[in-house]
Image (cartoon, rainbow, N blue to C red):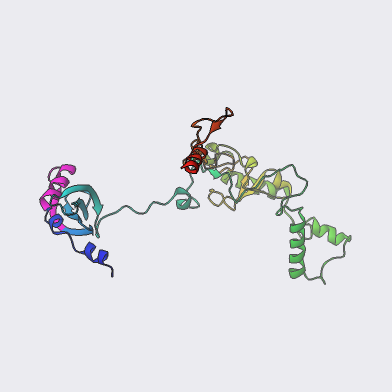
């Protein structure tokens, strides 16, 4: 253990005895009658001591007034350094602050609430880039085609796959290889139920800034119902994983409120880390002489 550490643990005698000075400073900062008994004197360093007083302020249970005093080397006059209110070991503190993006949970959004999305949200990507090459996760990309073929090879029994070009293969591709399918009445009944739960007339959609038809979190579906419905893929939205009407909407719309990127500070106008040469006089040819050249000339003739 070093000598400096040993000295810092032993309070300076004159600073430790300056309790009245510390109490007067605490009472001047606090409201009248809010400074309690002297709790302790803690050595902060060489000739630096912090006096702790109980805080009698309502709502600050366990807090303490901390008054730091010090003195110069070989001086007997103790002076005031600072006064501050600090929490003690059993102080009542506010919970640690958590950003709203981490506090938000699915189902927290209500009608009229607006959930901004970051400009670089990993859940979204440009829908149209102007390039001929589709995104890697596009259904027409080579990567996705290879993945689908690999999955089909693992889970499909090749012995029962109908021959390509047969009527059975075409029917299976069209989703018709079933004994019965939904009738027009069944389709309309399902559409009415879904529109009543997640349609344009719901309070959430009435207060939404835009409709689902233009939202990046909407997953399109096939068939005739795909012309009016889709699946919501926003985990913070009220309809995550549900079939929603294209005219439905909520405050989690991907383009409703895009958070701008953090501003980058401008480059400094004055660079204080480099030395700039300044002309100190004119040479024989009419040019300027820098400070470095002038110093070298003086040293050369000395």
- Identified at 13% across, 59% down, the residue is 13
Q: In this view, does 25 lie to the left or right of 153?
A: left
Decide if residue 57 is in sight here.
no
Q: Is residue 212 left or right of residue 3?
A: right
Q: Give the x, y percent position of residue 83.
A: 21, 47
- Identified at 39% across, 51% down, the residue is 97
Farthest-out residue, top: 286
- Identified at 74% across, 53% down, the residue is 139
- Identified at 18% across, 60% down, the residue is 11
Task: Give the quarter of the figure containing the N terminus.
Answer: bottom left
Q: Give the x, y percent position of residue 132.
A: 78, 46
Find out whether residue 220 is within the magenta segment.
no
Farthest-out residue, right: 165
Decide if residue 172 is in sight here.
yes
Q: Nearer the viewer, residue 239 or 142?
A: 142
Q: Give the x, y percent position of residue 25.
A: 16, 45
Find out whether residue 22 is within the magenta segment.
yes
- The magenta region covers 19-39
Q: Nearer the viewer, residue 201 or 110?
A: 110
Farthest-out residue, front: 301
Q: Is residue 216 above or below residue 167?
A: above
Q: Is residue 281 left or right of residue 26?
A: right
Count of number-bearing discs: 0
Q: In this view, does 16 lie to the left or right of 128?
A: left
Q: Give the x, y percent position of residue 202.
A: 54, 41
Q: Which of 52 and 186 is in front in this view?
A: 52
Q: Which of 102 and 275 is in front in this view?
A: 275
């Amino acid at each position: 253990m070093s000598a400096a550490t040993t000295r810092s643990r032993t309070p300076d005698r004159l600073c430790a005895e300056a309790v009245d000075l510390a109490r007067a400073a605490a009472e001047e900062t606090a409201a009248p009658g809010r400074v309690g008994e002297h709790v302790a004197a803690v050595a902060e360093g060489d000739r630096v001591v912090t006096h702790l007083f109980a805080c009698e302020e309502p709502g600050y249970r366990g807090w303490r007034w901390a008054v730091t005093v010090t003195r110069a080397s070989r001086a007997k006059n103790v002076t005031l350094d600072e006064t501050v209110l600090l929490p003690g070991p059993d102080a009542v503190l506010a919970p640690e602050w958590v950003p709203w993006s981490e506090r938000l949970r699915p189902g927290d959004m209500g009608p009229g609430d607006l959930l901004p999305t970051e400009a670089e949200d990993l859940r979204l990507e440009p829908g149209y880039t102007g390039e001929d090459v589709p995104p890697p996760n596009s259904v027409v990309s080579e990567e996705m085609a290879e993945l689908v073929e690999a999955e089909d090879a693992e889970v499909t029994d090749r012995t029962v796959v109908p021959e390509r070009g047969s009527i059975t293969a075409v029917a299976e591709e069209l989703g018709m290889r079933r004994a019965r399918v939904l009738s027009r009445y069944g389709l309309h009944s399902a559409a009415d139920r879904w529109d009543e739960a997640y349609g344009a007339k719901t309070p959430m959609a009435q207060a939404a800034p835009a409709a689902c038809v233009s939202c990046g979190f909407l997953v399109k579906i096939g068939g005739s119902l795909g012309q009016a419905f889709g699946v919501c893929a926003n985990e913070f939205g009220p309809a995550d994983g549900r079939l929603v009407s294209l005219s439905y909407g909520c405050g989690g719309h991907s383009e409703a409120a895009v958070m701008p990127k953090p501003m980058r500070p401008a480059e400094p106008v004055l660079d204080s880390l480099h030395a700039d040469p300044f002309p100190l006089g004119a040479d024989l040819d009419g040019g300027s002489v820098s400070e470095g050249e002038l110093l070298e000339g003086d040293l050369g003739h000395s």
